[in-house]
Image (spheres, rainbow, N blue to C red):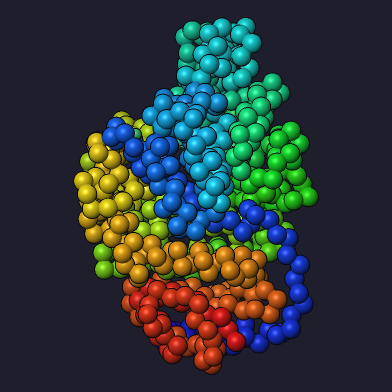
Amino acid sequence: MKRLRCFYLLFSSIFLCLQGPVFAQSTQIDHKWWKEAVVYQLYPRSFKDSNGDGIGDLKGIISKLDYLQSLGITAIWLNPVYASPNDDNGYDISDYRAIMKEFGTMADFDALLKGMHQRGIKLVMDLVVNHSSDEHEWFKQSRSARNSPYRDYYHWWPAEKGKPNYRYSLFDVNHDAWMYDSTTNAYYLHYFSRKQPDLNWENPKLRQEIYDIMRFWFDKGIDGFRLDAFTFVAKDITFPPFPKGYEKNFMPYYSMQPHLHDYLKEMYKEVFSKYDVLSVAEGAGNTPQDAHDLVDADRQELNMAYPFEWVDIPKPEGYSLVHLKAVISKWDSIFAQKGWLSVFLANHDNARMVSRFADERPQFRNLSSKMLNTLVLTLRGTPYCYYGDELGMVNIRFDNIADYNDVALRNEYAYLKKNGGDLKKWMEDMKFSNRDNGRTPFQWDNSAQAGFSTGVPWLKVNPNYPQLNAAQQEKDPNSNLNYFRKLIRLRKKEPTLVYGAYAQVDAQNPDVFAYTRTLNGRKILVLLNFRSKSVQVKHGEALKNAQLLISNYASPSRKNTLKPLEASVFLLK
Ligand code: GLC
Ligand code: CA
């Protein structure tokens, strides 16, 4: 009975949607390249190894530029490639103006940038400035003496004042963000690992150093920055006590602290205002208001929000589609009039989207991949597609702790072991959620190591590569890869998919995500079945004359059924 009512609701609400004015007022579009971009997030360590050391590198990426162009993507967000001792795979930078040795040279970087631009692909780099590496020259100087001119580039607490108030560390083996250093009898602050000391943004000299670094890369011609952990940079440097147990919900204490907006405004004035670039911070603050304050054009700070709320929803035990839909719809509505959103279901800090949001079993993973990519590429906002998701790569599910590389995971394992945690359950959960699942080498072909490397890869290749690889999908017109290309072509020729208003249809349907996108009287309906079984729906008359734009089935339903994991997109007439 309950089910029947849902079908009826879907049926009737599609009708209601259809009844909107045909001659709607023409909407003025504020065109921006970064709104129309299709971003591909490329994890360089795992993309293509050119010299057999098992580590992806810049020459490897260069050798695959034609492949990247063939996808139709128009920008790449490249995870950090700067000099780094790799405690956290490049998120611990020891020289912001040099390239990581394993990845190549500055000449390789210049060639990569040139090759991308020749192919119409822009480059967005990662800017990791909440912290540096402890091997950065600034930190070496800073730790050497209390009167070093670099002392105030970091946060130090003199030990004679006693132990500083507790600060939680996301990556530390003891969860303690203060590390004692005997050289000067003081503690330094590290929100992430001990090898990632936090930079002191309250120091104007440090801020100018960072702006210089940013200009260095922009003057080379890069097209944007993604600001890593940036909402954490501002801190109350008196380090007052936080309530006991705050670490269970630390964001209100770490994110969006006083002066953050002052720093962003200064950064805009000093750097961003001088270039036509994409600027996105990781995270969107603690409230919708924060998100607006970070990105509304008239505030002159950043230009795109990257909220985590919906990406955090899937859990090993499952999730509610109604909830996911509500959260995605909420974020769309927050930016309906002002500001701009990033849309993504995966990145290097998450496991694979097919494994988390849909059905990774071999018989369902292709449909799942196409269905989820349809979602990402038909929502309002700039889509970010994570490398390998064009193939439908899935979690590797390591059994053995030694197979993992992730510094956060290894330290948490040690912490749980020491504190008597339930390691068995935790290891099982990690197979679903740990970020190394999303970092395994790209699966190029069915040769050894999936064609990623002639050596031993730094992280194991998913053993499913003989069945799941780019070479095999190139040959198959119905592959995930070719569907992904088709979706991008569709988005590029339909401004309605970029700028059109979004309206959810039948919000309470537990199985189907359906919505319309409308621009200047042109209305597109997207139907996504999230279940690995057929579900009954009523499209009513709506689809009778509708034009099919794309589907993951050869003959999608025009009647009362959505096939398992069906994704179909119609232009309504
Ligand atoms: C961000 C990055 C993550 C990194 C952390 C510390 O969350 O996305 O990969 O480990 O910051 O830099
Ligand atoms: Ca290499």
> Looking at the image, which is closer to me, 418 or 18?
18
The location of residue 415, given as percent across then percent down, is 35, 32
Instruction: Tell me the quarter of the picture where residue 156 sits.
Output: top right
Q: How many marks?
A: 0
Query: Which quadrant, please, contains the N terminus?
Result: bottom left
**Location of residue 124 in the rendering, given as x and y in whole percent from the top left corner:** 56, 43
Tell me what residue is drawn at x 49 percent, y 81 percent. 548
Residue 571, quarter of the rendered image = bottom right
Query: Can the viewer see residue 183?
Result: yes
Q: Quadrant of ligand 2?
A: top left
For the residue pair 70 and 40, the one nearer the viewer reads as 70
Residue shown at 35% from the left, 69% from the top: 477
Q: Quadrant of the C terminus?
A: bottom right
**Is residue 344 at all visible to an observer of this figure?**
no
Can you name the residue that lies furthest to the front here? 118
Q: Nearer the viewer, residue 57 or 191?
A: 57
Q: Residue at x 55, y 78 (%)?
A: 525
Q: Residue at x 64, y 36 (%)?
A: 218
Looking at the image, residue 500 lies above or below residue 4 = above
Image-quadrant location for residue 103:
top left
Residue 401 rendering spot, x and y as whole percentages: 25, 38
Task: Locate residue 333 relative to residue 8 in the image: left or right.
Answer: right
Using residue 54 as the reference point, say whether residue 122 is left or right of it. right
Q: Is 444 displayed left or right of 161 in the figure?
A: left
Q: Nearer the viewer, residue 134 or 243?
A: 134
Residue 19: give x, y in percent of width and height: 66, 87
